[in-house]
Image: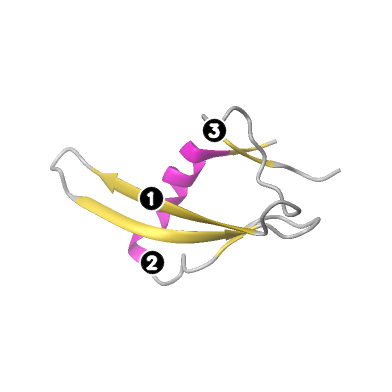
Amino acid sequence: MGDLLHQRGGGGRCLSYDTNPLYKLHIQCSDAAVVKGAEIFTVHINDNKAPTIDNLSSKPNNICLIKDALREFFSVI
């Protein structure tokens, strides 16, 4: 059995290929200077493969910030 992607704070709810093969994430980040950024990302749940996220490369300056936000939202077990 492969890794499962779980939503943190969602009661351990799994993202399921059978239930929904893609999920849209609305991520908003801000810093101490109240600079805000917001993006919508699509997580594709692939049957028996690691999940993929599209349009990360379209915002190369935000990749680290977005990956940190995704880590806070999801856990892989």
Q: Secondary structure at mark 3?
A: loop
In the image, residue 67 lies in the stretch drawn in magenta: yes
- Quarter in which the N terminus is drawn: top right
Residue at x 47%, y 37% (from the top left corner): 72
- Look at the image and say whether residue 50 sits in the magenta stretch: no
**What type is the residue that disc 3 sits on?**
Arg
Q: Position of residue 10 (x, y in %)?
A: 55, 32
Q: Which amino acid does the dot numbered 2 rest on?
A: Pro
Name the image colouring: secondary structure
Q: Nearer the viewer, residue 61 or 47?
A: 47
Q: Callout 1, which amino acid?
A: Ile
- Classed neighbour count for the residue bearing mark 2: other residues with Cα under 10 Å, few (<14), some (14–19), many (≥20): few
- Residue position for label 2: 60
Q: Secondary structure at mark 1?
A: strand
Q: Position of residue 63 (x, y in %)?
A: 41, 58
Mark 3: few, some, or many residues within 10 Å (few <14, many ≥20)?
A: some
Magenta-highlighted residues: 60-74
In what element is the residue under mark 2?
A: helix
All told, the count of numbered labels is 3
